[in-house]
Image: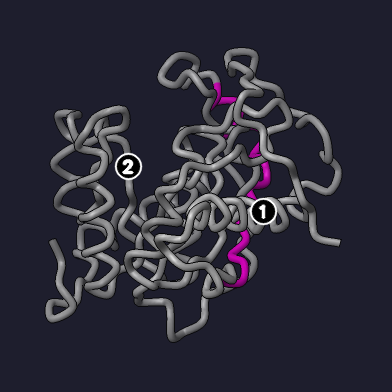
Amino acid sequence: MDTPTTPWRAPLLWRAAQLLARAVVGLLARLEVTGDVPDALRRGPLILAANHISPFDPVVLAAACRARRIHPRIMATGGLFRAPVVGPLMRRAGHIRVDRGTTSVHQALAVAAGAVAGGSVVLVYPEGRIGLDPGMWPERGKTGAARLAFASAAPVVPVAQWGSHEVLPYRTPRGMLRGLARAIVRRPVIRVHFGTPVALRDLHPGTPGAARRATDRIIDAITDDLAPLRPDEPGRPRHVDPGRPVDTSRSHRRRLAE
């Protein structure tokens, strides 16, 4: 676990991977990055909270963060760390393993809190999964991102993204080659926006309901920033993935900025 006396620096491997991600995204789509992160926060401690819409999201966010000179440590599903080649690379790059649905998931939060305390930028998906909202708006979030913010006292910057769902289908690797071929021909626009830090200082850990209120604010901020990225798709998206299931049990009431 990182400590405040040992500031974390992104390994050369991760920096090179971000450059590769930028090249891959450029081949498959047109990337537009808006917004920014203040210089004082760019090297951490900082929490980036992004919506999750596609298996292609990590590549897109790696490229977008590279465009803003940010090298985040990603909280990623344990399945990636168990993969023969990807797993060792993820560990060497400094990313944080999350074994969802197990008792060890709490250990990931402790590791992430230590990483942020050590000056890292940590990227999280507050929804905890690829969202299954019918309109592809952010779902009701899990409280992990809020608890990480409380534990580290680090600012939370919302990151809204749109368009990556047009590159890789939900059930990747099934249909992956067809999705990639379609993307190379059509080169969809992928938009990523870095918003302003979410106001959480008036909420206090340990107060009943504080983590839920903080989570809702984070999801609201992502939603507010997502709306301008899809102005002609206010309801259901134009591109519908037939293999993507729909789940309304975690729908989040959208409070779009006026």
Task: Give SS at disc 2.
Answer: strand
Marks 1 and 2 close (CB-CB < 8 Å): no
Mark 1 or mark 2, earlier in chain: 2
Q: Residue 147, position in %: x, y?
A: 39, 56
Is 171 situated left or right of 196 in this image?
Answer: left
**Which residue corresponds to mark 1?**
220
Closer-to-camera residue (133/153): 153
Circle on res. 204 = none
63 up-or-down from 245: above or below = below
Dot 2 corresponds to which residue?
Answer: 76
Q: Which residues are magenta?
A: 179-197
Percent x, y of residue 184 = 58, 34
Q: Please state the horizontal and vertical placement of residue 105, each as a whole percent of the image.
A: 26, 39
Residue at 24% x, 64% y is 115
Q: Depth check: 182 or 58 in front?
A: 58
Q: Is residue 182 left or right of residue 91?
A: right
Q: Is residue 240 left or right of residue 26?
A: right
Observer-nearest of 120 and 33:
120
Residue at the (25%, 44%) spot, across then down? 106
Q: Residue 163, located in which quarter of the rendered image?
A: top right
Q: Amino acid at mark 2?
A: Ala
Hey, which residue is sitting farthest bottom in the picture? 40
